[in-house]
Structures are given as structure tokens and as C-alpha cells.
Image (cartoon, rainbow, N blue to C red):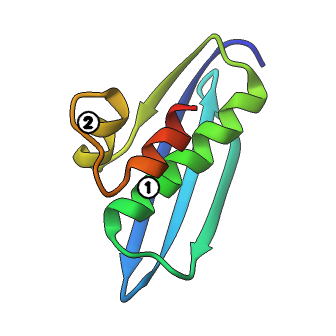
Amino acid sequence: MRGDLTLRFDGSFRGGAGGAGAVLYGGGEACWQAARFLSACPSSSHAEFDALCLGVEAAAQFSPSALAIEGDCRVVLSQAAGDAKARKLSKLNSRAAT
């Protein structure tokens, strides 16, 4: 699929563990989805970034002409866009950017 894709991601965190999920949409329909359990998750932002990485890595397999990213974590979206500095999450931010 070489058209435009939209990535929607979300992460969850509770008591040291979490989850990461992402869905890719192309042409108005879901074309890929996945979720994973994070057994050692230090924060909610970490879970959100992990979800972003999950989706971005999958999107690369589709070679889209453009990728829109939607999520509910302002910290992660700001850091991924380069509008805020990624301090504690710099490794995950670099992974998402790559």
C-alpha cells in the first residue's frame, strides 16, 4: 500500500506494567492492528511511546506516501514532532523517529 496512512496509538500503565496498541488506517479502513503487554513499564508516557513505535514500525512495512499520527498523549506527540525535548524517553523517541 503506497497511499496515505493514519496511525492511531494508545498506551496504558498500571502498577509497573502496561500495554501498547496501534491501528493503521488506509482508505478509511483498518489495514493493520496490534497490541502488546509491557511487563516492565516505568510510566504512562513510556507505554504511549511504545505504542507509537509499534505503529510506526508497522507503517514502514507499507511504505506509505504519508503517515498521519493521532494519539491522546500530548507529551509524546510534542516530543515526536520535535516541539518538546525528549529527556527520559529519548531512546524511544529516537526509535520512533528512525
Picture coordinates of residue 94 (x, y %)?
Answer: 48, 40
- The relative height of residue 58 versus residue 98 in the rendered view (above or below) is below
State the image coordinates of residue 8 (x, y, percent, origin top left). Answer: 48, 42
Seen in the picture, residue 76 relative to 43 is either above or below; the reply is: above
Q: Which residue is mark 1?
A: 10
Q: Please tell me whether mark 1 sits on a helix, a strand or a loop.
A: strand
- Image height of 45 relative to 17, above or below: above
Q: Quadrant of residue 16?
A: bottom left
Q: Residues within 10 Å of mark 1 (few under 14, many from 20)?
A: many
Quadrant of residue 3 within the rendered picture: top right
Choose between 53 and 10: the one closer to the eye.
Answer: 53
Residue type indicated by callout 1: Asp
Give the amino acid at mark 2.
Ser
Q: Which residue is mark 2?
A: 78
Q: CA distance from mark 2 to mark 1?
A: 15 Å
Answer with left or right where residue 56 lies relative to residue 9. Answer: right
What secondary structure is marked by label 2? helix
Q: Earlier in the sequence, mark 2 or mark 1?
A: 1
Rendered position, 14 above or below 43: below
8 vs 44, left or right, is right
Q: Which mark is residue 29?
A: none
Quadrant where the image shows the C terminus: top right
Location of the N terminus by quadrant is top right
Counting labels gives: 2
Q: Is residue 21 visible?
A: yes
Query: Residue at (51%, 71%) from the top-left corner?
Result: 19
Which residue is nearer to you in this view: 6 or 86? 86
| Foreground tag (2 vs 1) | 2
Seen at 41% across and 57% down, the residue is: 48
Crowding near the residue tagged with mark 2, few <14, some 14–19, many ≥20 C-alpha atoms within 10 Å: few
Image position, residue 72 (x, y; %): 30, 48
